Image (cartoon, rainbow, N blue to C red):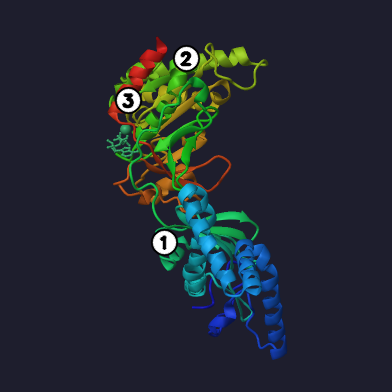
Amino acid sequence: MLNGKSNGASQVQPTAPVPAHAIRFSTPVVETPAVFIIGRWLWRLLAFFGALPVRFPLATASAAVLAASWWLLGWIGPALVCTVATIGGLAWRRFHPGSFRTWVALRALGLVRGVWVYRRHWQPVLVVSGLAESYLERQYLPRISAVTCTEWADRVRVKLVPGTAPSAFEERTAHLAHGFRAPACRVEVRGPLDIVLEFPRHDMLADPIDALPVPDSADGVDLAALPMGLREDGRTWRMRLHGTHVLVAGVTGSGKGSVIWSAIRAMLPAIAAGLVRVRAVDPKRMELSYGRSLFHRYADTAEACVELLEEAVADMQDRAARYAGRIRAHVPTLDDPFDVVVLDEVAFLTAYHPDRDIRRRAEAAMATLTSQGRSVGYAVLAALQDPRKEVMNLRNLFPDKVALRLDEASQVDMVLGPDARDRGADAHLIDAGVPGTAYVRLEGSTMPVRVRAAYVSDADIDAMTAADADGGE
Ligand SMILES: Nc1ncnc2c1ncn2[C@@H]1O[C@H](COP(=O)(O)OP(=O)(O)OP(=O)(O)O)[C@@H](O)[C@H]1O
Ligand SMILES: [Mg+2]
C-alpha cells in the first residue's frame, strides 16, 4: 500500500512497489544515471560532515578533543580525557542533577531513541499508515529533522513534503502512536511544513496530586494564572479567571469539584483580604456547602440561586455604569473586588428545573454576566455534566473550557471545538480511575494540553475556612 494518501483534488495513480531505500528523504524514484546518483551522495556526505559542528557541537567537540589528545600523547591521551570526563560527569550528576539531566541524560536519550525508535521504524510506519506521498510515480516521505526528549515525552520534529498539510498527521495519530509503541501521539504545528510529533513516554498525571500550597499573601495571588494542578509535561497548570469565564464539563465523578476548589484555594488570601468575592450557587447542596463560610453569598434552593444571580447582575451593571467612560480595565480593590460566581451543576437551573420561569431567569442572568462581566471584574466559573445544546446553550459565552472525562466524542467537540480531538484531546477516553484529569487549551496556544487538577480534600477545605476566619479577623 505504497500509494499513500492524496490530499489534493487530483487522484494519484497507484504505483508499482518501490524499493525501500528509494523513498527516504523525498528521493524521487526514477532511473537516474549512476554518475548523478554518486555525485548526489558525495554532496550529501560532504554536507553532512560540514553541518556536524553546528548540529552536534558537543559530540563534535568531544571527538575533536579525543583525537587531539591521541595525536599529542598517544593512547594515554584519550584514556586521560575519558577518566577526567567520567569523574567530572559523576560529580556534575551528584551536585547538579537537574542540569546534568537536561544537558547530558536527556540529550543522550534523545540521540538513542532518535536512532533506535524513530529513524529505524520511520519508513515502514509512515508508509503503512499512508503518510508516504506519491506523485507521478515518485514516492516522497516526510523527514525527521530532530528528536529531543523531555522528562515525559519524545518530540520528533518533522519536515513535511511540500503540498501536504499537518492534518494528514492529525488524522493518523492512533497509527503513529501504535507504530512507535507510545501511549499517544499529539501533533503540534510550528510553521509551514514544520510540525512536532509528541509521544509521551510515561504518564506524569497517573498519581493524584495533593492540594497545592496556598499563596502566602494576597500579593502572591495571580488571578490571571491560578495554580490548579499539573500539566502532562510536569509543569504547573495555571488557569486564568480574571478577564474570562470558565466552563468545566465532565460526567458525574469526573472531578469537577477539584477544579472548582483548586481555583478557590488559589485565591484564598485575596478572598480573606476582601479583594476577591465569591458567590456560590450550589443546587445539589453537596459541592460548595462544605466551605460556605468562604463565600460572600451562598444559595442552594432554586429561587435563592436565581436571586443570587440576579443580584450579581445588578451589581455588575451598577459597576459598569460607574466605570462607563472612566475606566477601561478592572483592577481588584476593596471597593471593587474581583467578583466570581461559582455555579455547580448549572444545568439544574438552565434545563432540569421544572419551573419555566426559574429556567428563563437563570439563563438570562447567566447570559448577562458572561457577556458583559469580563471587563468590569466579574467572572463565572460553572460546572456542568452534560454539555449538549438542549442542556446548556450558553456554552459559547465561556471563552475558556475544561473538558474532564466525557461520555462521547461529540461532547468533546462541543466543549473544546471540532479540531481538538484531531490534536489529541480525547476527553471521552479519559480513564474513570484518574478523576480530575482534563484537557484544556492554554493561553496563546491552540494545542489542547492534558492536565490534572489537584485534589482538595475535606480536611483541606476545613483548613481553608479556618485560615480565612483568621485572615478576615
Ligand atoms: N483531582 C482529583 N484527584 C484525585 N481524585 C479526585 C480528584 N477529583 C475528584 N477525585 C475523586 O473523585 C470523586 C468525585 O469527584 P467530584 O465530586 O469532584 O466529581 P464531580 O465531577 O463533581 O461529580 P458530580 O457531578 O457527581 O458532582 C471524589 O470524591 C474524589 O474521591
Ligand atoms: Mg460535583
Quadrant in the rendering for residue 268: top left
The residue beneath circle 3 is 461
Quadrant in the rendering for residue 34: bottom right
Q: Is mark 1 within 8 Å of ligand 1?
A: no
Quadrant (top left/top right/bottom left/bottom right) for the C terminus = top left
Q: Amino acid at mark 1?
A: Ala
The residue beneath circle 1 is 182
> Residue visible at 34% across and 19% down?
465
Q: Is mark 2 within 8 Å of ligand 2?
A: no
| In the foreground, 72 or 269 | 72
Give the CA separation, mark 2 to mark 3.
19 Å
Coordinates of residue 358 in the picture (x, y in percent) = 37, 22
* Residue 258 in sight in this render: yes
The residue beneath circle 2 is 274
Q: Residues within 10 Å of mark 2 (few under 14, many from 20)?
A: many
Coordinates of residue 417 in the picture (x, y in percent) = 49, 46
SS at circle 1: loop
Coordinates of residue 356 in the picture (x, y in percent) = 36, 25
* Residue 307 in sight in this render: no
Give the CA separation, mark 1 to mark 3.
38 Å
